[in-house]
């Protein structure tokens, strides 16, 4: 059993689904949660390639912490098509105190397992991860 200082174990499915998102673009986003009973980060939801950023936002519970990755497609000012993978640490103010301690203490270890993330975003409120903020961080 992992302790909070070392971070949670990471289910192999998390890494495999992330590679599918990164290399094959099989998903638009992935939401991860910590299963406290088994002390492991697991996949909670996979977003279809046609899903939008609003679909990701709606997938994050208002009172519980989560991690998410989002494959953001955009066009630069030079009219070039680009993509960046975002890591989002969602920790709403209304989450349980234990959860708000557990997720940040496990974040770095989990984040290291996801090779290829280009931008990291931390949010405690939906306005801190609005589409405009994501777009601004990508450019």
Image (spheres, helix red, strand yellow):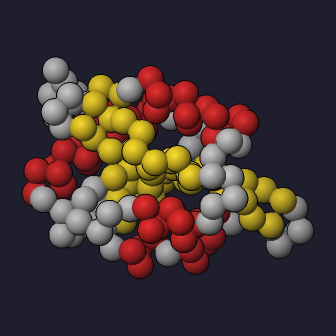
Residue found 41% across the figure and 79% down from its top: 127
The image shows residue 35 at horizontal and vertical percentages of: 24, 38
Q: Nearer the viewer, residue 86 or 43?
A: 43
The image shows residue 79 at horizontal and vertical percentages of: 89, 68
In this rendering, the count of numbered labels is 0
The image shows residue 34 at horizontal and vertical percentages of: 27, 41
Q: Nearer the viewer, residue 38 or 23?
A: 38
Residue found 63% across the figure and 70% down from its top: 135
**Vertical side of 114 occupied by 28: above or below:** below
Residue 83 lies in quadrant: bottom right
Q: Is residue 92 left or right of residue 11?
A: left
**Vertical side of 134 occupied by 69: above or below:** above
Residue 44 lies in quadrant: top left
- Residue 93 visible in this rendered orientation of the protein: yes
Residue 64 lies in quadrant: bottom left
Residue found 39% across the figure and 74% down from its top: 126
Q: Nearer the viewer, residue 122 or 46?
A: 46
Residue found 47% across the figure and 28% down from its top: 13
Q: Is residue 107 left or right of residue 117?
A: left
The image shows residue 52 at horizontal and vertical percentages of: 62, 66
- Residue 5 visible in this rendered orientation of the protein: no
């Amino acid at each position: 059993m992992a302790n909070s200082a070392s971070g949670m174990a990471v289910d192999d499915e998390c890494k495999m689904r992330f590679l599918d998102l990164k290399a094959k673009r099989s998903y638009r986003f992935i939401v991860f949660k910590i299963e406290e009973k088994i002390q492991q980060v697991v996949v909670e939801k996979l977003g279809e390639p046609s899903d939008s950023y609003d679909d990701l936002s709606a997938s994050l519970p208002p009172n519980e912490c989560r991690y998410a990755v989002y494959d953001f497609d955009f066009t630069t000012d030079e009219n070039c098509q680009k993509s960046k993978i975002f890591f989002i640490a969602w920790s709403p103010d209304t989450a349980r105190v234990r959860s708000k301690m557990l997720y940040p203490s496990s974040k770095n270890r989990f984040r290291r397992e996801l090779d290829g993330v280009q931008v990291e975003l931390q949010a405690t409120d939906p306005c801190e991860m609005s589409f405009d903020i994501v777009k601004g961080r990508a450019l």
